[in-house]
């Protein structure tokens, strides 16, 4: 049952990304282009996602444990250290240049676009390098 819930969650997330246009790198880049062809629709997508997710987070916090695990796996540290800020900055720069982050990139591989494949392979390679450096 756990894997069915994971599959359905992934499918719903992917369909939402496609319907909202977030698999289109230009949509993201135009949102970030404040002085050019600015497209505010990404702000509405994010606002809608927050609006939908908030009740779920509220309900989950009322539970003693998750449905499919023995305990919640929440971050212990609340520190804003150099690694967190630097990593977030690199992620943001990559997101701005490429117009995709991991979720939309993986969803976009279904479009059979060679540029997306190059992006996803590069993203996975970067994740492997980071894992080697950090650990």
Image (cartoon, helix red, strand yellow):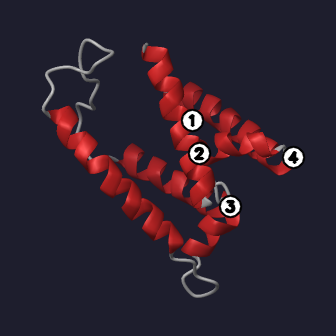
Q: Name the residue that disc number 1 marks.
A: 11
Q: Which mark is residue 114?
A: 4
**Would you say the residues marked 1 and 3 are in contact, meaning their CB atoms lie under 8 Å apart?**
no
Mark 4 vs mark 1: which is more N-terminal? 1
Q: Residues within 10 Å of mark 3 (few under 14, many from 20)?
A: many
The foreground one among 110 and 100 is 110
Mark closest to the chain's N terminus, 3 or 4: 3
Q: Is residue 113 left or right of residue 6?
A: right
Viewer-nearest of discs 3 and 2? 2
Choose mark 2 or mark 4, whichever is in front: 2
Look at 14% across and 21% down and name the residue there. Answer: 64
Element type at mark 4:
helix
The residue that mark 3 highlights is: 25
Give the residue at x 63% y 29%: 128
Disc 1 + disc 2, Cβ < 8 Å: yes
Residue furthest to the bottom in view is 35
For disc 2, the marked residue is 15
- Look at discs 4 and 1 and give the one toward the viewer: 1
* SS of the residue under disc 3: helix
Distance CA(mark 4)–CA(mark 1): 22 Å
* Numbered disc 1: secondary structure: helix
Cα separation, mark 1 vs mark 3, equals 20 Å
Image spot of residue 99 (x, y percent): 65, 60
36 w.r.t. 116: above or below: below
Q: Is residue 59 above or below residue 96?
A: above
Asked if the residue at tag 4 contacts the one at tag 2, i.e. Cβ–Cβ closer than 8 Å, the answer is: no
Q: Earlier in the sequence, mark 1 or mark 3?
A: 1
> Circle 1: is it few (<14), some (14-19), or many (20+) Cα within 10 Å?
few
């Amino acid at each position: 049952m756990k894997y069915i819930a994971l599959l359905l969650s992934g499918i719903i997330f992917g369909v939402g990304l496609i319907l909202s246009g977030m698999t289109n790198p230009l949509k993201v880049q135009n949102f970030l282009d404040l002085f050019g062809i600015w497209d505010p629709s990404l702000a509405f997508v994010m606002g809608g996602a927050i609006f939908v997710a908030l009740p779920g987070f509220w309900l989950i916090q009322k539970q003693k444990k998750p449905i499919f695990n023995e305990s919640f796996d929440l971050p212990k540290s609340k520190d804003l250290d150099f690694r967190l800020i630097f990593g977030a900055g690199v992620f943001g720069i990559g997101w701005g240049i490429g117009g995709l982050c991991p979720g939309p990139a993986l969803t976009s591989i279904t479009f059979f676009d060679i540029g997306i494949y190059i992006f996803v392979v590069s993203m996975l390679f970067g994740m492997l390098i980071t894992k080697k450096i950090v650990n």
